[in-house]
Image: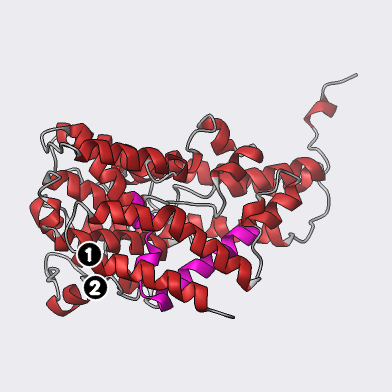
């Protein structure tokens, strides 16, 4: 038999209308094409594009596997732009607004109702002292904030608004305690703010248990250990090293390594599985706190970020309730996903809309975790009385509430 038959192109099926899932992927690819324009990622983008074109030439099972893999892998860190046309530049330097700074010093600053561009403006105010102290390029930090913002998913709770809220809680406490100068070096306080902003980067809206039980590629990559926290920390570090987002590039190589060594364990400490360890280690270090000890300083970083991460009950009830209902929505959605995937069900997250279950969930969380954590923190840093009063008032309000 001649060889010419081997050179014939395989028959391609007639074009098929893309499914909703495929349409979403196409839209994502197009978005990435715009955002990645001018970067070194054109090869990868073309590969994705060509692979998508061949989807209809393979069987349905393999196609669905490919689509799901693309959905998982496309999440981060890909949203990045080399845009240079920012509000603030050499001809229009950033000048903090004292009125806005004063608003930001309130723990009850209403994050949820603000548009993302306003929150990024607020971040410039929150980071201003560090921008000056470490000679951070204004263009780079604006680009960095956009990259961070765009790489949070639109989950009910674990989204950019939560990230800003955590960073903001750290700011309010830092302002009351002279930037934690009794406990941290200035560079470490800067690292704390960066950790707060990036601590949930690219969060998928499910727990580590879900990631492990579903055998998600990230769980395999991180050996089932603090899966999401490892992913968040790695994503944050990657952005800090991207050309155009590398806001630490003005530091010495040694200082950049030091920042990395601080940020990674601080983000990892937000794993709720480490709650008891974080508290016990902090108690141990505070028996004879020594600012010269890197271990003691790291313990302080860990508990501040951890407390801020679960700090929604320190807000007034109107704000705290919104955040509570958002996390419950994520819980309910996870239970549904577990049922669809036929993996073990996280029954404690099956809360639904039953007001009594919601009340028990929130009161139990305050009693078991939040109040002891913030009481411990209040014993060692100044100005937390109103935070504790809000926690206690919120608990009373949950007990009284009859419907939502």
Image-based side of 71 in relation to 319, left or right: right
Return the residue nearer the eye: 9 or 288.
288
Which quadrant of the figure has residue 395?
Answer: bottom left
User: Which corner quadrant holds the N terminus?
Assistant: top right
Q: Are marks 2 and 1 in contact (CB under 8 Å)?
A: yes
| CA neighbours of label 1 inside 10 A, class few (<14), some (14 to 19), many (20+) | many
Q: Is residue 256 magenta?
A: no
Residue 320 in the image: above or below residue 344: below
User: Residue 39: image x %, image y %?
Assistant: 38, 48
Q: Which label was assigned to residue 172?
A: 1
Residue 372, x across and y down, in percent: 36, 53
Q: Residue furthest top?
A: 1
- Vertical position of residue 209 compared to residue 308: above or below: above
Residue 119, x across and y down, in percent = 32, 70
- The span shown in magenta is 306-333
Q: Which mark is residue 9?
A: none
CA separation, marks 2 and 1? Answer: 7 Å
Whether residue 402 appears in this view of the structure is yes
The residue labelled by disc 2 is: 106
Q: In this view of the protein, which residue sits in the foreground, 318 or 5?
A: 318
Circle 2 packing at 10 Å, graded few (<14), some (14-19), many (20+), is some
Residue placed most toward the observer, 267 or 370: 370
Question: Residue at (16%, 55%) from the top-left corner?
Answer: 137
Of the numbered discs 2 and 1, the one sitting upstream in the chain is 2
Q: How is the image coloured?
A: secondary structure
**Residue 358, quarter of picture:** bottom right
Position of 39 with respect to 10 (left or right) is left
């Amino acid at each position: 038999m001649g060889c010419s038959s081997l050179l014939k192109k395989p028959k391609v099926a007639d074009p098929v209308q893309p499914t909703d899932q495929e349409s979403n992927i196409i839209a994502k690819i197009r978005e990435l094409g715009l955002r990645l324009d001018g970067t070194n990622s054109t090869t990868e983008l073309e590969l994705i594009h060509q692979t998508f074109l061949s989807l209809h030439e393979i069987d349905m099972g393999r196609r669905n596997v490919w689509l799901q893999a693309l959905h998982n892998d496309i999440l981060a860190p890909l949203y990045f732009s080399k845009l240079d046309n920012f509000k603030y530049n050499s001809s229009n330097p950033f000048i903090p607004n004292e009125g806005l700074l004063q608003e930001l010093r309130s723990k009850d600053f209403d994050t949820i109702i603000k548009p993302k561009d306003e929150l990024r403006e607020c971040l410039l105010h929150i980071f201003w002292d560090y921008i000056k102290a470490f000679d951070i390029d204004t263009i780079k930090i604006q680009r960095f904030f956009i990259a961070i913002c765009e790489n949070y998913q639109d989950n009910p709770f674990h989204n950019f608004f939560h990230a800003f809220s955590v960073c903001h809680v750290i700011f309010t406490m830092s302002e009351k305690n002279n930037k934690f100068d009794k406990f941290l070096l200035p560079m470490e306080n800067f690292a704390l703010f960066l950790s707060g902003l990036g601590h949930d980067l690219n969060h998928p809206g499910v727990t580590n248990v879900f990631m492990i039980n579903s055998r998600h590629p990230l769980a395999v990559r991180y050996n089932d250990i603090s899966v999401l926290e490892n992913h968040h920390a790695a994503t944050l570090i990657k952005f800090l090293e991207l050309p155009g987002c590398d806001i630490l590039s003005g530091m010495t190589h040694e200082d950049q390594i030091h920042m990395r060594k601080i940020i990674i364990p601080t983000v990892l400490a937000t794993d709720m599985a480490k709650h008891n360890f974080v508290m016990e280690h902090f108690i141990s270090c505070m028996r004879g706190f020594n600012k010269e000890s890197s271990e003691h300083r790291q313990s302080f970083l860990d508990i501040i970020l951890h407390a801020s991460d679960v700090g929604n009950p320190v807000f007034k009830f109107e704000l705290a309730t919104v955040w509570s209902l958002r996390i419950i929505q994520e819980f309910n959605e996870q239970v549904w996903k577990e049922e669809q995937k036929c993996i073990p069900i996280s029954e404690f997250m099956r809360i639904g809309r039953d007001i009594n279950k919601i009340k028990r969930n929130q009161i139990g969380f305050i009693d078991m975790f939040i109040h002891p954590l913030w009481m411990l923190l209040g014993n060692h840093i100044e100005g937390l009385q109103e935070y504790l009063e809000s926690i206690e008032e919120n608990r009373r309000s949950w007990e009284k509430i009859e419907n939502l």
